[in-house]
C-alpha cells in the first residue's frame, strides 16, 4: 500500500456556546430544554421575521482567527444557502460564502503546521430523531439557529493518526479560548472528512506537481462523532479506495456516511457541488464592518501553554492533563509564586481527575495548604471527593485536617505498642516506619507525615 498516497481535508462544525442563538434572542440550549421550546418566528423563517446578528458569536470567531494567525477581513456578509431538508424549517440556511470571517490560519501540532483554508459562521439546523421501527421521524428545532462555526482545512493530512490528533487539538483550542466545549459525543463538534487515495506518480525533473497528480477522487465521509471514529473512518476509507484502485474499479465523487457499529462507510448520494445551493446575499442582513467587533484580552493556544508549563519542569503527561482540564491559569498563578507548588498542582491534576471540578480558588487553596499540612496523596484525594460530594468548602475540610491533636495520638501509639517501641530503642530502626504508619492510620491519613516523624523521634529519643 506504500505506493498509494492518502490525502485528507477536514470540515469541522463547532457549536459556539453563546447565551442566545445566532440571529435571534432564543436561548442557545439545544438539548437542555424541552423539545421545540427555544424557538421563535426567526428560527422558523416566518414572513416578517427579521434576523439580528449575535455580536458575541462574531467576537468568538475573531478571537480564534487572531489566535491562529488567520486573516480577518475588514468587512463580512452573510448569504442564504438554499436546500430542502426537514430539519431546516426556513428552506435555507444563513451562512457565509463570499467573505468568511476567518481566511487562512495555522494550527501547529508536534512541530507540524496544518493550514486552514477558511472558517465561516452560520446557523445550525434542527435535530431529526427517527423511531426505532423507522415508521416516522420527529424533529427538535431547539438547535435550529444555534451559532455554528464551520472550519475548512487544506488537504494537509496524510494519515488517520494526524487527523485524529488535529481534531483533539482543535477541541483543546476551543476550550482554552472559551468558545465551545466542543464535545463530540454531545454534537458540539462534528467532523466530516474529504478523503482521496491516489497512486504515487513519478515526476520528471522540474515537472510541476499539479493537484491532479497528488489527489485522487474526493469522497466525503459524514456522521463521525468521536475521535476514535474519525481515525477508524479514515483508515477504512483508505483501505476501501486502495482495494478499488488495485482492482481497476472506478471511484466516484460521492458522500458516504460512517457507521460506527459496522465499522465501515456507506454510500449516501452523489456529492453536490457548490452551485447546487444557489447562494445569494441575505437581504435582511447588512454588510458588516468588523472594526467595531473588538475582543478584549490575550488568548494563548494550547501549544503556547505547553511551552510555558514545560518551563516549570512539569512533565508532558501532566501538562496535557492541565490543559485538558482548563487548569493552565491556576497552575501558572501558582508557578509565579513557587514553581514547586505548580508541580504539586500538576501531580494532583494527573492523579485525581475530579480535581478539575473544584472552583479555581479552592484548587489553589488546596495546593497551597497541601505541603504546609503535609497532606498525603490519599488524603488530598479524600478531601477533593468530600468537597464535591458534600459541598463543603476546601477551607473547612483543611481546618479539620489541621485541628488533629497529633501529640496525643503519638503518645497513644507509644502506649499501645510497648514491644515495638522497646525493639526500636534496642536498634531495630525499621520499626520506626511501623509506628509512623500506626499514627497515620489513627488519623485516617489526615496528619502531616513530617510532623508525625518529628514528634515520634522526639518522644523516642
Image (cartoon, grey):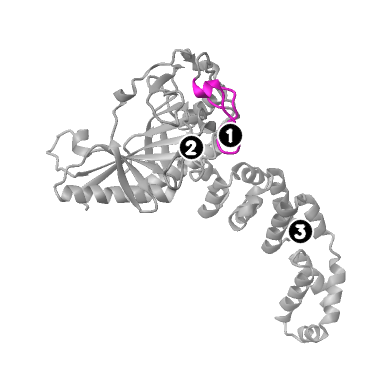
Q: How crowded is mark 1: few (under 14 residues within 10 Å), some or many (20 or more)?
A: some
| SS class, disc 1 | loop
> Mark 2 or 3, which is nearer the eye?
2
- Which residue: 15% across, 50% down? 247
Q: Where is residue 277 in the image (x, y as percent from the top left)?
A: 34, 24
The residue at which mark 1 appears reads as 29
Query: Magenta residues?
Result: 21-45
Q: Is residue 279 above or below residue 12?
A: above
83 on left or right of 198:
right
286 on left or right of 159:
right
> Can the viewer see residue 461?
no
Residue 247 forms part of the magenta stretch: no
Q: Is residue 204 above or below residue 242?
A: above
Q: Nearer the viewer, residue 143 or 171?
A: 143
212 on left or right of 234:
left
The disc at residue 373 is 3
Rounded to the nearest whole Å, what is the CA distance between mark 2 and mark 1? 18 Å
Rounded to the nearest whole Å, what is the CA distance between mark 2 and mark 3? 58 Å
Q: Main secondary structure of the magenta part?
A: loop
The residue at which mark 2 appears reads as 138
Number of labelled discs? 3
Q: Which of 243 and 393 is in front in this view?
A: 243
Q: Nearer the viewer, residue 233 or 428?
A: 233
Q: In which quarter of the image is residue 257?
A: top left
Locate the C terminus and report the quarter of the image it occupies: bottom right
| SS class, disc 2 | strand
Amino acid at each position: 500500500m506504500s505506493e498509494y498516497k492518502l490525502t485528507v481535508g477536514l470540515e469541522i462544525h463547532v457549536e459556539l456556546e453563546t447565551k442566545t442563538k445566532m440571529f435571534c434572542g432564543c436561548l442557545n440550549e439545544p438539548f437542555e430544554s424541552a423539545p421545540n421550546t427555544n424557538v421563535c418566528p426567526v428560527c422558523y423563517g416566518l414572513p416578517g421575521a427579521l434576523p439580528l446578528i449575535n455580536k458575541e458569536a462574531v467576537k468568538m470567531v475573531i478571537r480564534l482567527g487572531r489566535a491562529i494567525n488567520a486573516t480577518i477581513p475588514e468587512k463580512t456578509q452573510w448569504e442564504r444557502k438554499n436546500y430542502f431538508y426537514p430539519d431546516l424549517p426556513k428552506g435555507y440556511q444563513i451562512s457565509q460564502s463570499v467573505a468568511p470571517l476567518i481566511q487562512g490560519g495555522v494550527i501547529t501540532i508536534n512541530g507540524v503546521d496544518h493550514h486552514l483554508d477558511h472558517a465561516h459562521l452560520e446557523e445550525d439546523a434542527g435535530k431529526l430523531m427517527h423511531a426505532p421501527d423507522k415508521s416516522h421521524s420527529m424533529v427538535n428545532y431547539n438547535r435550529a439557529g444555534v451559532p455554528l462555526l464551520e472550519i475548512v482545512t487544506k488537504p494537509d493530512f496524510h494519515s488517520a493518526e494526524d487527523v485524529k490528533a488535529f481534531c483533539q487539538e482543535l477541541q483543546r483550542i476551543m476550550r482554552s479560548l472559551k468558545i465551545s466545549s466542543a464535545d463530540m459525543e454531545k454534537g458540539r463538534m462534528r467532523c466530516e472528512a474529504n478523503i482521496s487515495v491516489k497512486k504515487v506518480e513519478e515526476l520528471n525533473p522540474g515537472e510541476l506537481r499539479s493537484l491532479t497528480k497528488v489527489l485522487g477522487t474526493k469522497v466525503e465521509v459524514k456522521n463521525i462523532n468521536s475521535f476514535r471514529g474519525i481515525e477508524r473512518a479514515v483508515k477504512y476509507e483508505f483501505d476501501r479506495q486502495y482495494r478499488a484502485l488495485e482492482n481497476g474499479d472506478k471511484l466516484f465523487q460521492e458522500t458516504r456516511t460512517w457507521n460506527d457499529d459496522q465499522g465501515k462507510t456507506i454510500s449516501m448520494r452523489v456529492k453536490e457541488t457548490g452551485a447546487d445551493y444557489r447562494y445569494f446575499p441575505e437581504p435582511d442582513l447588512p454588510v458588516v464592518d468588523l472594526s467595531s467587533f473588538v475582543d478584549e484580552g490575550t488568548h494563548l493556544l494550547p501549544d503556547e501553554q505547553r511551552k510555558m508549563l514545560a518551563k516549570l519542569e512539569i512533565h508532558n503527561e501532566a501538562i496535557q492533563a492541565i490543559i485538558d482540564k482548563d487548569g493552565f491559569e491556576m497552575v501558572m498563578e501558582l508557578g509565579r509564586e513557587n514553581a514547586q507548588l505548580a508541580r504539586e498542582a500538576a501531580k494532583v491534576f494527573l492523579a485525581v481527575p475530579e480535581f478539575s471540578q473544584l472552583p479555581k480558588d479552592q484548587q489553589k487553596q488546596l495546593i497551597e495548604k497541601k505541603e504546609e499540612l503535609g497532606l498525603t496523596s490519599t488524603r488530598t484525594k479524600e478531601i477533593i471527593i468530600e468537597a464535591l460530594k458534600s459541598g463543603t468548602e476546601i477551607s473547612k475540610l483543611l481546618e479539620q485536617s489541621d485541628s488533629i491533636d497529633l501529640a496525643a495520638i503519638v503518645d497513644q501509639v507509644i502506649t499501645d505498642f510497648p514491644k515495638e517501641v522497646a525493639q526500636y530503642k534496642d536498634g531495630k530502626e525499621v520499626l520506626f516506619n511501623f509506628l509512623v504508619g500506626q499514627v497515620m492510620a489513627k488519623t485516617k491519613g489526615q496528619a502531616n507525615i513530617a510532623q508525625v516523624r518529628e514528634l515520634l523521634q522526639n518522644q523516642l529519643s
